[in-house]
Image (cartoon, rainbow, N blue to C red):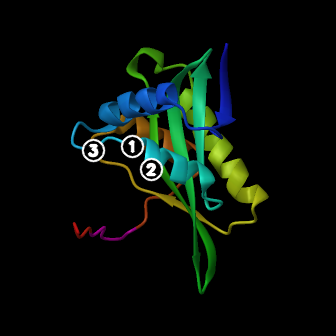
Amino acid sequence: MITIQELTKASPKALEDINALVFQLSERLPKCSMELLTKIIADENVELWVAQDDETIVGMATLAIVVIPEGERAQIEDVVVDEKYRGQGLGKQLSEKLIARARERKIGSISLSSRADREAANKLYQKLGFEQWPTNVYRLKL
């Protein structure tokens, strides 16, 4: 049975599973380190939720809370389900959990970005009520 839960402990197995998912999200992304995973779990403004099939993490999604002068905002990052588990609604369950957590934390809005070629993900976000926002996204590599 697959469960959705917040990851509260870093382990070599969790790290291995997460890195496999990150690779499926994009082969260009760097691997997560144990140090970084531990830091994510310890951060009160970051929640890493996972879909687990027994002891194996088969999906994940991250909720990041950003505190700015206008208030707190949420950002959804790295929603990915293992290709063998897709089509079972796990991406939807993970996304709904993040939305519920943001509501519980009384966050006013949630944003996310998704590549245009991730058609299923984009359809899911629209079904969940997200609206495409007219903006430019910029990134500066440091």
The correct choice, above or below, for 73 with respect to 11 in the image is below
Q: Which residue is mark 1?
A: 33
Which residue occupies 53% across, 47% down? 38
Q: CA distance from mark 2 to mark 3?
A: 14 Å
Q: What crowding class fits label 2: few (fewer than 14 Cα within 10 Å), some (14-19), or many (20 or more)?
A: few
Q: Position of residue 103 (x, y in %)?
A: 74, 58
The part of the chain drawn in magenta is 134-138
Secondary element under disc 1, as helix, strand or loop, is loop
- Dominant SS of magenta comes to loop
Of residues 82 and 10, the one drawn nearer to the viewer in this rendering: 10
Q: Position of residue 63 (x, y in %)?
A: 57, 53
Q: Residue at x 55, y 42 (%)?
A: 127
Q: Residue at x 45, y 33 (%)?
A: 15
Please identify the quarter of the rendering in which residue 25 is found.
top left
Examine the image and state in which quarter residue 27 appears. Answer: top left
Q: Which residue is mark 2?
A: 36
Residue 140 part of the magenta-drawn span = no
Quarter of the picture holding the N terminus: top right
CA gap, disc 3 to disc 1? 12 Å
In the picture provided, is 124 more to the left or to the right than 6? left
Q: Nearer the viewer, residue 33 or 91?
A: 33
Could you say which is closer to the camera, residue 57 or residue 114?
57
Residues tagged 1 and 2 counted as in contact (Cβ below 8 A): yes
